[in-house]
Image (cartoon, rainbow, N blue to C red):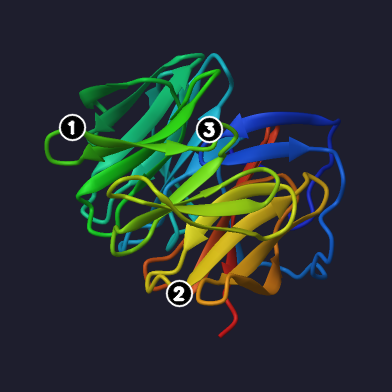
Amino acid sequence: MKGKLGWALVTVGAAVGLTGCGISVLGGTPAKHAPKPIRPAYIVPTAKGSLAETAPSVQGVVWVLAGSTTAKALYQVSLSSRKIVGSVSVTGAATSVALSPTGQLALGAGSGNVGFVQFLDSQTGSVQQTVPLGGAVRCLVASADGSTFYALDVTSKSASVSLISAQTGKVTSTLPAALDAVSIVPTPDGSGIYYLEPNGNVSEIATVGGQVETTFSVGTAGRSLAISPDGSTLYVLKGTAAQTNIAVVDLATQGVKRALPAAADSAQIAISPNGTDLYDLVGTPTLGNLQAVKIPS
């Protein structure tokens, strides 16, 4: 089930579809000021239909969610051997996946106004606990200390970020978000959560009270977020299936410092624990791979 490799991949017909922690924009207006294509540091084949990824563990393991609307699986990918080393079937309603720094694996799922998060055994993939939510999960991420999972769950009329205790599996609080938010990422200290809208607006909400602390723009066609371990830099995947880049945002000034290249058909980005590499997940119905991008110093 390995996907075809390549930095510049296929362009397909115009459509818009949600993926885990991002939005797949197939066709449309190309991103402005895109950097010239360069080869990634390395490419790891995943499964066709790759939709979502976890941040890498310190052991160099990434979990990738892939499949179709009827059948999905989680694939365990080793960055050291650069290959799939295991897989497990999951619900066809799965939309996103997250791995905490402590090794807790969680799956976001749902459709329409029904959603839930499943805590999984990272060795066997068996469901340990199911947490019902008020809407379908569009994005799922873990806190830097592993204590909390953040689920962006949406209905046809509202969106919110649910904070779920990794220890108890209970929702501890719910914060408002924009209805069209496609990706979220918490600050490393847990004091705030950034969410991204397709128009390129990024907003930070406080985890206590849910007030909007700031809003700024990073350019059009926002798709996925990642944040540096020290909380100083935000990485924003944006663009279309044909032309995509990663905006590097200085959070002190809220300005874009530079743009890094990204593969066509990118679905999501994640950052390494030491903050030196970005992992760009690429997926279409016929291919999938994970492309490592070195972050310039």
The kind of secondary structure element at disc 2 is loop
| Residue in front for this viewpoint, 116 or 202 | 202
Tell which residue pokes out farthest to the left in this image: 168
Q: Is residue 161 shown to the viewer in this render?
A: yes
**What residue lies at 56% left-to-right and 85% top-to-bottom?**
297
Residue 81, relative to residue 28: is it above or below?
below
Q: Is residue 162 above or below residue 226?
A: above
Could you say which quadrant of the image residue 229 lies in? bottom left
Q: Is residue 270 visible?
A: no
Q: Nearer the viewer, residue 217 or 259?
A: 217
The amino acid pointed to by label 2 is Ser
Give neighbour class at mark 2: few <14, some 14-19, many 20+ (Cα, 10 Å): some
Residue at the spot of label 1: 169
| Marks 1, 3: nearer the viewer | 1
Residue 232 circle label: 2
Callout 3 crowding tier (Cα within 10 Å): few <14, some 14–19, many ≥20: many
SS class, disc 3: strand
Dot 1, crowdedness within 10 Å: few (<14), some or many (≥20)? some
